[in-house]
Amino acid sequence: MNYKEYGKTGKQVSTIGFGAMRFEEPENTEKSVQTVLKAFELGINYFDTAPGYCNDLSEINVGHAVKKMKKSGKPFYVSTKSSKADGKELREQLENSLKRLNLDTIDFFHCWYVLTLDEWEKRKAGGAVDAILKAREEGLIRHAVFSTHLPGPDIRKVVEENYFEGVTLGYSAINFPYREKGVQAAFEHNMGVVVMNPLGGGLIPANEDSFDFLKIREGQNILDGALHFLMSDPRITVSLVGFRNEEDVETAVQSVERGESNLYNDREIEFLRNKINTDLNNLCTSCMYCDGCPEGITPWKYMETANLLYLNALQPLSSRLQLHWGADIKALENCTECRECEEKCTQHLPILERFELLKKKVKEEKA
Ligand code: SF4
Ligand code: SF4
């Protein structure tokens, strides 16, 4: 396992991190803790969790593993988060996280899920940012960082305010142009950059044929293609992989080891960037942040299905909707076009436009 310095914190973190939001059976403490410990044994030392992941069981499971990892004497780093805008509420959530994680100090504490610049202003006005900085002064956290779904230029604005030492953002072979300027801004400011969704929310392995071009070296599999692309980028510190079980951990670590000794050169990176830019712009990553439609519509089911239009998938859209998602195209008739989902969309996709396209194509299939 290779390690990189996280920004200018002096912490050497593993090039892949443990994303603790996908435990296969989160209520099975022993199995979940074993999954964390397997990662630690194989060299992963960055563990990312959050209150609410797996109904709080993620922090609890990581907390059990923390007790065992402490005994090893080897360094490890825990990251957690709060999306509260109110300083007092954030502090309360932070204290609960410390208890669940069995820690006196959280290494990387995120001002979590900054979706718009308006919201960023609310975090400052509500006292959340001050509460994070105070907690750092008091030693409850070591490093103040933020996580965001903002587009690149907006990320630059937050970075340039100099509150934080690092950023966590969605970035993958699918969507990298969208946040490119943010990654560059963080790098220029010597900040750590942690990438979430490196596999495009599972879209890349699920559409292996369409993403085949990511495999540019002999013997690579699709996971290698997606991960090696990120690992070869000197600006990216950690790629977070959501692990379900020990097997997932072993598979990812093997992939990393294959890439470490054979990173892409500049010419290969440029080739991939050009290819992705032209071939795969604008896909839904199924992140589900557009959840909460007042009309009870589940936009991501339709948007993930609409990806097939761009991926040239052979599966009929209607069967994808019905068999994979159990969704009915007729539900879209209830859409009032309030655009709430579009405002929340992490990829800033034209959801309503795609609904119309989807309706038209499904109708054509039935004709
Ligand atoms: S635009 Fe339509 S799908 Fe989106 S939140 Fe509003 S009603 Fe729901
Ligand atoms: S439509 Fe946007 S917010 Fe919704 S799942 Fe897709 S990428 Fe995420």
Image (spheres, grey):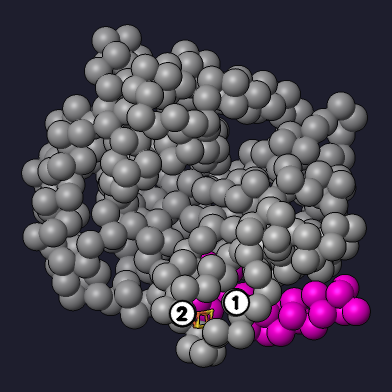
Pick out the residue farthest to the top. 72
The residue carrying mark 2 is 295
- Whether residue 229 appears in magenta in the rendering, the answer is no
Residue at position x 70%, y 79% in the image: 354
Q: Which numbered dot is residue 77?
A: none
Residue 330, horizontal then vertical, whole percent: 65, 78
**Tally of marks:** 2
Whether residue 205 is situated above or below residue 332 in the rendered picture: above
Q: Secondary structure at mark 1?
A: helix
Horizontal side of residue 288 vs 163, given as left or right: right
The span from disc 1 to disc 2 (Cα, nearest Å) is: 9 Å
Q: Amino acid at mark 2?
A: Glu
Q: Position of residue 59 (x, y in %)?
A: 29, 36
Can you identify the residue that label 1 sits on? 331
Residue 193 lies left or right of residue 276; in this view the side is: left
Highlighted magenta segment, given as a residue range = 341-367
Residue 205 in percent (x, y) is at 73, 42
Question: Is the residue marked 2 within 8 Å of ligand 1, measured from its CB?
Answer: yes
Q: Earlier in the sequence, mark 1 or mark 2?
A: 2
Is disc 2 surrounded by few (<14), some (14 to 19) or many (20+) residues within 10 Å? few
Quadrant where the C terminus lies? bottom right
Q: Amino acid at mark 1?
A: Ala
> SS of the residue at dot 2?
loop
Q: Is residue 191 above or below residue 311?
A: above
Residue 25 seen in the figure: yes
Instruction: Give residue 142's quadrant in the image.
Output: top left
- Residue at the location (78% across, 60% down)? 319
